[in-house]
Image (spheres, rainbow, N blue to C red):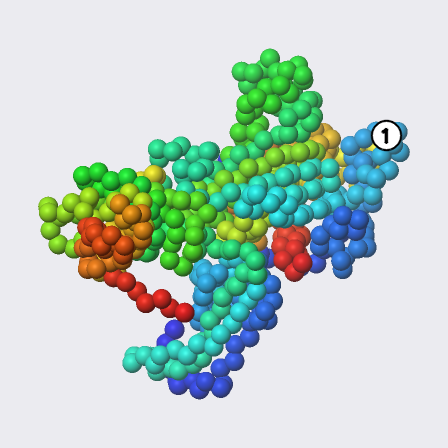
Amino acid sequence: LFNRTMSKITSSCVPPTLSNCYIPLPSKQSSKGNTSTTKILQTSKESDTRASFIYNSENVADHPAKNKRETRGLRRIHMEKAILTKSNGSSIVEFGQTKILCSVHGPRSPMSSSASGQQEFHSEGVLNVSVKFAPNFGVRPETVASVSVSEASSNAVDPRLAMTTLATSSSPEEVELSIRLQSAISAAVPLERLEKSVIDVNVLIIQSDGSDLAACVTAAILALADAGIELYDLVSCCSVAVVRKRNGDCGSGSEKWVCLVDPTEEEKLASKGMVTLAMLPNWKEVSYWDQSGRISKEITQEAIELCRDGCATMHKFMRQCLIDSNND
Amino acid sequence: FFFQKFEVMTDHVVTLRYDSGSMLVPGDRIGNSRHVLPGPGTYIRGVNVYSCAVGKLSISQHLLDEKSDVERSSTSISASVVPVEGRTYAFSQKVLSVGQVVLGRVTRINIQQATIEIIAAQGQGALGETHGGTIRKEDVRQGASEDVEIRESYRPGDIVTCRIIALGDSRRYFLSTAENELGVVKALCESSGEIMTPVSWKEMECPSTKTRELRKCAKPRDIVS
């Protein structure tokens, strides 16, 4: 993973329209932000769908739903806020099959928050972020096994053992997600106005199917806005996976790589590298950016631009969710 | 910006991105800070005024004072984002700050200080969670602190109004009653258990037994209807 940096992205080409994006279909659960954009827009020049990149040709037929998704298409998005009555703020976010639940308590005194050390005094506010996978079903055992190979808990190669360690304590992946989530959100929370207060953000990953961090950021920001905590801006986050094209398919063989936005778990495992970007859309600044794997400079540039487009789209949906649920 | 000429009110029309009454989310840019004054629910960054809360945009006309060095008189707009009914918004209302007057209950006293449980704050009403506070001997009243006896100023169970003078540490704020309007508001008589009325700034009297007890009383305020 590369270190994240704060950087300004020039806004020369943030597209205002949603060209070439797969718009979520309206569902009975009132998926947000799609009242005016229910049609699937033009497909891009290369009509290869994602499934053909990942799967063998015989498997493509088994996944008809995945055939329809373009490389620049987001998955079906569902956002809701104020679903928990006892929390100050809460939200649930779904990106396709990834489902995230977030609950926010705050701002409150450090004494009543169990997550912060009671003896410490903070002149500014403190943001406690905790991400947990739902025990035993939040994340697939194969993913856990593939991630935890380098740790001392490499005895967790056995998937069942890995799942039990997840249930009891914070696994390294949870800790890492918490840290990344905190650095992504804290740019938007004005902590200097929150003297001596603590905000607890608890994220539960009910089901993890790729784009975990993007969904966590979305859920956390929606829950913070739902709690009434003033934010500088909404943070939108998007991931892109870089996948190798199969040689037999492409007519022009110059590019071997393709960028897939909002990857699923399979796409993530099959990818050569991934780029995640979280930005504050109105300030046009990046709050979190990381890249994993090994990909060339040109394709990284393309992936980052795709992330930015995805963030802009996500911002529209988040905005719609906040406005709609307030009008109810 | 230094305006060279005298701008007449009616010529200066400001158009905003969002209409008054439209819903805004955090981060929406309302306008340029030259024309728009930031009200509650907004903030300034650089040259722009942005929204920082979820709510409806409300705009009010605001006439600037004429300044002596800058000859201009133009209407400026004050924008604020007002949260929708039924939600308590804005941590700026929930977080206690230095200088705020709060209402507390005395829980413990000793020779040097009185321990207070802050239950309400001015402008916020009753707090969801109580905070801790401390009134030290030197902050009880103005003047010398050697002859101040905590036991003659507060007793456990009294309700006091006090002002936050420092953030203190994680467990308590530092409070002060060193003003005429601050001090014990309500106290119960030790013998009869009835609410006592203040007689002077240092005495309270029980209406039934007529005994007087020493307290540092707050100046009684008329109830505003």
Which of B146 and A103 lies nearest the eye of the viewer? B146
Does A256 appear above or below B221?
above
Q: Could you say whether the residue bearing mark 1 is in a helix, strand or loop?
A: helix
Query: Along the horizontal axis of the image, is B61 left or right of B167?
Result: right
Does A327 appear above or below A239?
below
> Callout 1, which amino acid?
Asn
Residue B28, visible in the rendered structure? no
The quadrant of the picture occupied by the N terminus of chain B is bottom left
Extreme front residue here?
A: B209
Name which quarter of the figure residue A97 lies in.
Answer: top right
The residue beneath circle 1 is A59
Which of A38 and A245 lies nearest the eye of the viewer? A38
Residue occupying image coordinates x 56% and y 43%: A87
Residue A323 screen position, x and y as percent: 63, 58
Residue occupying image coordinates x 68% and y 22%: A141
Query: Along the horizontal axis of the image, is A151 left or right of A74?
Result: left
Residue occupying image coordinates x 41% and y 69%: B225
Residue occupying image coordinates x 35% and y 79%: B65
Does A88 appear above or below A177?
below
Which of A212 and A206 lies nearest the eye of the viewer? A206
Residue B220 screen position, x and y as percent: 28, 62
Residue B202, visible in the rendered structure? yes
Residue A227 screen position, x and y as percent: 54, 49
- Chain hosting mark 1: A
